[in-house]
Amino acid sequence: MSSSDPKPGPKPGPWPPAPESSAMPPSTWAKRTGFRPKFSGETTASHSGQLSLLASARATPSETLNPDLEAGQPPLRPPPLSAVANVQTEKDKNAKPPPPQPLPPLTAAAAAPVKRRRDSDGVSGRSNGPDGGGGANGSGDPVRRQNRIEETVEVLPQSRDDDLVARNLHMKYGLRDTPGLVPIGFYGLQHYLSMLGSLILVPLVIVPAMGGSHEDIANVVSTVLFVCGITTLLHTSFGSRLPLIQGPSFVFLAPALAIMNSPEFQGLNGNNNFKHIMRELQGAIIIGSAFQAVLGYSGLMSLILRLINPVVVAPTIAAVGLSFYSYGFPLVGKCLEIGVVQILLVVIFALYLRKISVLSHRIFLIYAVPLSLAITWAAAFLLSEAGAYTYKGCDPNVPVSNVVSSHCRKYMTRMKYCRVDTSHAMRYAPWFRFPYPLQWGVPIFSWKMSIVMCVVSIIASVDSVGSYHAASLLVASSPPTPGVVSRAIGLEGFTSLLAGLWGTGTGSTTLTENVHTIAVTKMGSRRVVELGACVLVILSLVGKVGGFIASIPQVMVASLLCFMWAMFTALGLSNLRYSEAGSSRNIIIVGLSLFFSLSVPAYFQQYGISPNSNLSVPSYYQPYIVASHGPFKSQYKGVNYAMNTLLSMNMVIAFIMAVVLDNTVPGSKQERGVYVWSDSETVTREPALAKDYELPFRVGRFFRWVKWVGI
């Protein structure tokens, strides 16, 4: 062939040519391709409306079928071989790569990841000649390039079916799945045992603070179990319909302690004090719950949702856990050999042994709280029976004020907090007891305490919104609509009203630990939660169950609370994964919110207290007596009480700071991680969404005109 012959040109691209793809707005390579490294400040934002569909090209079949949730997003199933064959034919493999061409149109067969290769030395990788000879050196062996870095970018079409598969791939049962009776019973027991601390620890704190006896603790625990079961059944049926357990949230603990330590209750003693304070709490909870119900059922919550985003939820919930630092370890120090062992055990189980599985169940991670409690309680019982905390001539059941001997007075604290036989709740608790409304008496309504609870109900709603969104990404086909969120918040107000009528001491709301439990147990069926709720109602009728729980030593309760409050803080901060956590805007907002949520309440709590002040309450209750000495002083005592109490609460300051800064400081939706809720068009287009959130028994047909609280 002469040299004048034209040289063969590159092979043409696919025919017909693909239409030009629309330009992608993101300006960086990472945002254009969807690549999201773990340690990148710019691209760490997770989609708040849908999960990522990027899969690992090196995922083995075992990793695909049994993904590890702690390693990040679950990988997708490997693409079928037929799809790969359709994307890259044998002819294309032997052909010289053409110049860059537009991508072909995506079809069902092209749903496999498309691999692109980029070489760091600027030279294309291995290629074959037209004769199939292969390398540039004329031999069949390819040329070995030096310092070549291959980056695999997987581009998947955004398909709703694939999205649903990605969401539910790691779940054993989905939202609407109904497994057999045996799996439901087993997973229901597992689900509630993993949340044991959240269900029982709050009454073990507030009843002793009100001056209640061990019998009062047993009765309140039974009431809490009964109300938790009823409210959970109502929520899974007529609320958000997500598998979320309702219970006494830590959000209500700080205002309850503040009301208990009000100046007007300092002169009361004994059981009279307990019943009077409980009635005051009931009145405040009823008013605050009614306000929350109006907030939800009126549709106002749909408007407030525009102000609630991950950057608001994260510091607000984190401040709830951080606010109890003064209560945790100071009480553990009453008996270090028991309390520290309890903390170490729960940390070892939850962290160091979390990946140990027995019959495909991570028992140490799931049952960290009940296992550590059982082991420590058994050890303390053996020490008590062996006489380690028995001192000659000293009786731990005698009040400290009545002890005359200086020898016994020296060891009274040790005997009271280290022995496990000082509580007689189990002995005197009846076998059958039915919790009934107004069992402590008629509620007492005070407007100043009601204002405090109304503000706290807004914080509880913010907590629930974050739980709804996170849980829906795990178990449902799509996030709920704003109407469903409003309906769920309204029902939470109604269920908190029931808690106020029955007298649990706190309101009822969605427990934040639900999301962690669902992710660990991989159980997303609402039937499991409903069966467990029925079991709670039955157990609440057995008085001995409440007596057994009331017998848990107070030091062990404080040790478990140290872990639970730390976990509560971490769960709150985990909401930042829906935003760009590395953004300087978000870092500053969260940092300011958390700092001032600790500093401003400290100013209110320390105002007017001299170092030599002789306070009538223990040191761990001092942050909650601010109403008697706070800096806000006007001619209206009720206003002084409400303002000093509210501004001394860490979560209130964090919420105010975060909601103002996040909604006034400029930032893109991606940077802020704005929650993406489903809309009415999505409901019409996707029947699965309607099936996930529609009311049962065709109840929703009667409320179709109420658009702001429906699907």
Image: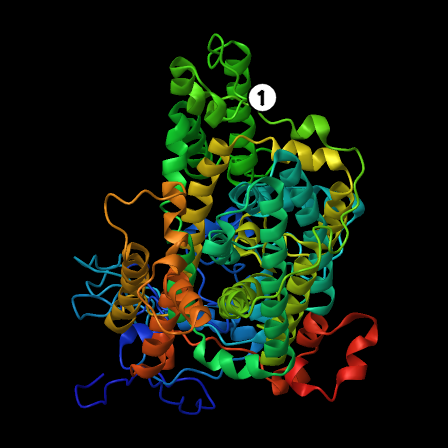
Check the picture and name the quadrant holding the N terminus. bottom left
Q: Residue at x 36, y 73 (%)?
A: 634
Against 309, is 617 above or below?
above
Quadrant of the image occupied by residue 212: top right
Q: Residue at x 43, y 60 (%)?
A: 317
Asked if residue 177 lies left or right of residue 392, the reply is right
Q: Please indicate, yes or no, whether residue 573 appears anywhere in the rendered image.
A: no
The residue that mark 1 highlights is 421
Q: Please indicate, yes or no, whether residue 384 appears anywhere in the rendered image.
A: yes
Residue 447 is situated, as x and y percent measured from the top left of the image, at 55, 70
Q: Secondary structure at mark 1?
A: loop
Asked if residue 678 lies left or right of residue 594, the reply is right
Quadrant of the image occupied by residue 550: top right
Q: Amino acid at mark 1?
A: Asp
Asked if residue 119 lies left or right of residue 655, the reply is left
Residue 665 is situated, as x and y percent measured from the top left of the image, at 29, 81
CA neighbours of label 1 inside 10 A, class few (<14), some (14 to 19), many (20+): some
Query: How many dots with numbers?
Result: 1
In this orientation, which residue lies closer to the viewer: 51 or 242?
242
Check the picture and name the quadrant holding the C terminus. bottom right
Residue 375 is situated, as x and y percent measured from the top left of the image, at 53, 25
Q: Residue at x 58, y 68 (%)?
A: 288
